[in-house]
Amino acid sequence: MASIINGKEIGQQIRQSIADRVVKLKEQGVTAGLAVILVGDNPASQTYVRNKQKSCEAIGIYSELIKLPEETKEEELLEHIKTLNNRQDIHGILVQLPLPKHINEDNVIATISPDKDVDGFSPISVGKMMLGQDTFLPCTPFGVMKLLEFSGVELAGKHAVIVGRSHIVGKPMGQLLLQKDATVTYTHSKTKDLPSFTKQADILIAAVGRANFITSEHVKPDAVVIDVGINRDENNKLVGDVDFTDVEPIASHITPVPGGVGPMTITMLLYNTVQSAENTLQQDK
Ligand SMILES: Nc1nc(=O)c2c([nH]1)NC[C@@H]1CN(c3ccc(C(=O)N[C@@H](CCC(=O)O)C(=O)O)cc3)C=[N+]21
């Protein structure tokens, strides 16, 4: 029987301390502000964006939604970002991904000022993260690190195996674990005999994007299993990359979906936004 890592509860605790920082900022005349740009009307994106706005409101962060039509030209999107880069009342800028196919995501992300890149996706942010410098960390891997910390999971000398190598989850996840002295193995869709690797994991990070892909056959007894997946099953139910019912009995710790990593992603977005607002006060000194 695994201990269930409750991301909703841990996220709530962290949000409480973020809310305290929002109050302190207000006392100094600063209202932390986040701008979210949504291009097109992908229903999943609309749900995420609504959740982000509600979460901002709940802790006193100003949030502004910029909704642009699907056919928006890349240049026009870049102009919106440049305007936001220059606005004093906006401390964080998030461009909801994925973008329509005619827009180059790399150009868009590179246009966001690194000072406001609360997603931690820009080349500057990624480079600083790789070098262990102070920067905004990408919200999902950052949230996973907080879950591990709050759950008392030790990382030094442990073998962390990551399944998936996306720019926004897998790759940075490995870096952050490495910085905490874990031994890190990356696996991906071209990996041969995946279970031979995942079976060695003390900490297994599933970020593949395939429903119930990781089963007990992939998992060493007493491993810590972190499920970053968000998929819909055949009944349109939200499920992770891990077959929870199968894996839970043999794991030492496991995150559920929903209620695991997802709420932490939004929590760390709020965290980064407040950090960005605090940074502006430092610069004024
Ligand atoms: N620029 C950008 N930054 C992102 O951070 C970003 C993005 N684009 N595009 C889409 C993905 C997805 N994402 C999620 C955040 C929270 C939940 C979340 O809170 N999930 C809840 C369940 C929500 C539900 O029930 O639908 C949970 O797991 O408990 C899920 C998914 C952020 N993303």
Image (cartoon, rainbow, N blue to C red):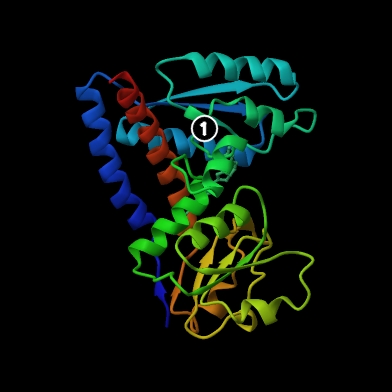
Which quadrant does the C terminus fall into?
top left
Q: Nearer the viewer, residue 261 or 257?
A: 261
Residue 68 screen position, x and y as percent: 64, 21
Q: Nearer the viewer, residue 92 or 11?
A: 92
Residue 109 screen position, x and y as percent: 63, 31
Examine the image and state in which quarter residue 183 appears.
bottom right
- Tell me if residue 258 can be seen: no
Q: Nearer the viewer, residue 195 or 127?
A: 127
Examine the image and state in which quarter residue 61 appears.
top left
* Ligand 1 is within 8 Å of the C-beta of the residue at disc 1: no
Look at 53% across and 30% down and name the residue there: 114
* Residue assigned mark 1: 117
Which quadrant does the N terminus fall into?
bottom left
The residue type indicated by label 1 comes to Asp
Horizontal placement of 107 versus 53: left or right?
right
- Tag 1 secondary structure: loop
Look at 41% across and 15% down and name the residue there: 88
- Tell me if residue 48 can be seen: yes
Report how many numbered discs are placed on residues in the image.
Answer: 1
Seen in the picture, residue 30 relative to 54 is either above or below; the reply is: above
Seen in the picture, residue 120 relative to 114 is either above or below; the reply is: below
Residue 244 screen position, x and y as percent: 54, 73
Horizontal placement of 263 versus 279: left or right?
right
Horizontal placement of 118 versus 197: left or right?
left
Are there few (<14), some (14-19), or many (20+) residues within 10 Å of tag 1? many
Look at 34% across and 56% down and name the residue there: 10
Residue 123 screen position, x and y as percent: 62, 37
